[in-house]
Image: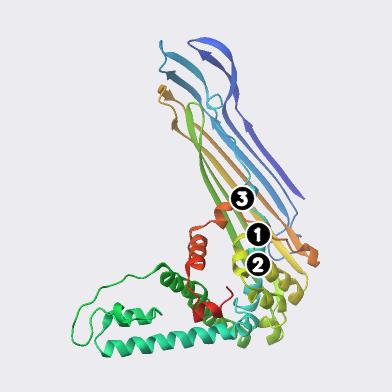
Amino acid sequence: MTTGLILQDDTYQTAITVNGNPVGTVLAGPYFRKQWAGSDTPADSPVLVENPYDMTLDEFVIGEADYVLKNSPLIQRHGSMLSLGMPGVISGTSLWDSNDDLVLLGKVATKIRGSDFNLGNFLVEGRQTTALFSDTATRIAKMLHYIRDGNLYQAGRAFNGVKLSTGHVLRNRIGRNRKVNGFSASEVSNAILELQYGWKPLISDVHSSMSSLAQTINRPFITTIRVSKVKRSTEVIHGTYASYSRNTIYHVKLKVKYVAPTNVFDQFHLTDPLSALWEVTPNSFVVDWALPVSDYLKAVDLYRTFGPQTILRSEKSVCSVRYLGPNSDNVQSLTGSGTHDNVTYKRYFSNISTLGDVPAPVLKSIDKVLSPTHMLNAVALLTAKASRFRNSLKF
């Protein structure tokens, strides 16, 4: 076991004064502390081994501060950034939850298979794919028919799946003009739903299936994969007389050694009926907006299909606090500075030995549930017409 500690504490207590009169003391000055502990690499090892390791680094400089308030008469104060409300650092773990762990495990499964293509889901959604191709082919044929007749407006309406009437015609064969009506909310909503839940998933499946096929043809037996995810937070904190920024980053990496799938059933998710069942459940994708059930089922399939996984997990948290400037019109002048940096790093083995080790999903925060994309899709669902394409999907 290797351990270490570096400590340099040059902090001191400085007087807090109001118009030159002392009213107390407050901490000021620089501070640095780094502590670590980890397992040693065996002496006979030809390479450096990534053993469990912990490290914490904390460094700050709390500057003395002089500020003048616009009272009558003026009030002169002295102290440090702490007396001005300088906030402390926070741990990046506050940005992380089990939903993020599920995303990482999903990335592991994707790397093992070579893609995220799910043949089981593709088969159970075959009627949707057929309807999408049929509907699109019909609209293209109508569009070409109207283009041949020189009716560009009616061609555009046909391609968007709008049922046309005589009143919609902009220019007929003899050139008479008619009133132009814009697209309705339901027509636009149908187009959004077709893009979001029709063509985008279909194009993604085509690309993923080719990647999965390449992995099947040229499959390594044992390999090492790495996946990672980063969460960030930026906030401005307003004190009584000063403002500060606090930036936090949390970076998690997983390293897994695995044996590649030995048959096409595991390779293409054909032994994963739960995901296929959830895929065809009405409004399942709406539930996933708030509770990522599909991500959980992917993680469960990772354990069921490939067995226990030995995972080397690395977690790094970085938080920085910086003084920005005065935060009140009552401040005539303010001089001083303040910084605080905190870094933690932890590397350890996180094994999935049983199904109970798979993290359970949790409800997402309200800002994620009400994201712009989700809100757009929700409005489209509420305003879309009952069309052939819409009825073929899981609405």
Q: Position of residue 124 (x, y in %)?
A: 63, 83
Seen in the picture, residue 129 relative to 103 is either above or below; the reply is: below
Q: Position of residue 37 (x, y in %)?
A: 73, 48
Is residue 79 among the parts visible in the rendering?
Answer: yes
- Label 2 SS: helix
Mark 1 sits on what residue? Answer: 99
Residue at 75 percent across and 54 percent down: it is: 39
Q: Residue furthest left?
A: 175
Sequence-first disc among 2 and 3: 3
- x then y, percent, for residue 377: 50, 65
Q: What type is the residue that disc 2 sits on?
A: Asp
Q: Nearer the viewer, mark 2 or mark 3?
A: 2
Q: Quadrant of residue 7?
A: top right
Instruction: Name the amino acid type tagged 3.
Output: Leu
- 287 up-or-down from 15: above or below: below
Numbered tag placed on residue 295 in the rendering: 2
* Left or right: residue 393 compared with residue 307: left
Asked if the residue at tag 1 contacts the one at tag 3, i.e. Cβ–Cβ closer than 8 Å, the answer is: no
Mark 3 burial class by Cα count in 10 Å: few <14, some 14-19, many 20+: some
Residue located beneath label 3 in the image: 95
**Three-letter code for the amino acid on which mark 1 is drawn:** Asn
User: In this view of the protein, which residue sits in the foreground, 372 or 89?
Assistant: 372
Label 3, label 1: how many angstroms apart (C-alpha)? 11 Å
Query: Splitting the image into 4 quarters, where does residue 302 fall?
Result: bottom right
Work out whether residue 305 or residue 372 is closer to the camera in this orientation and state it: 372
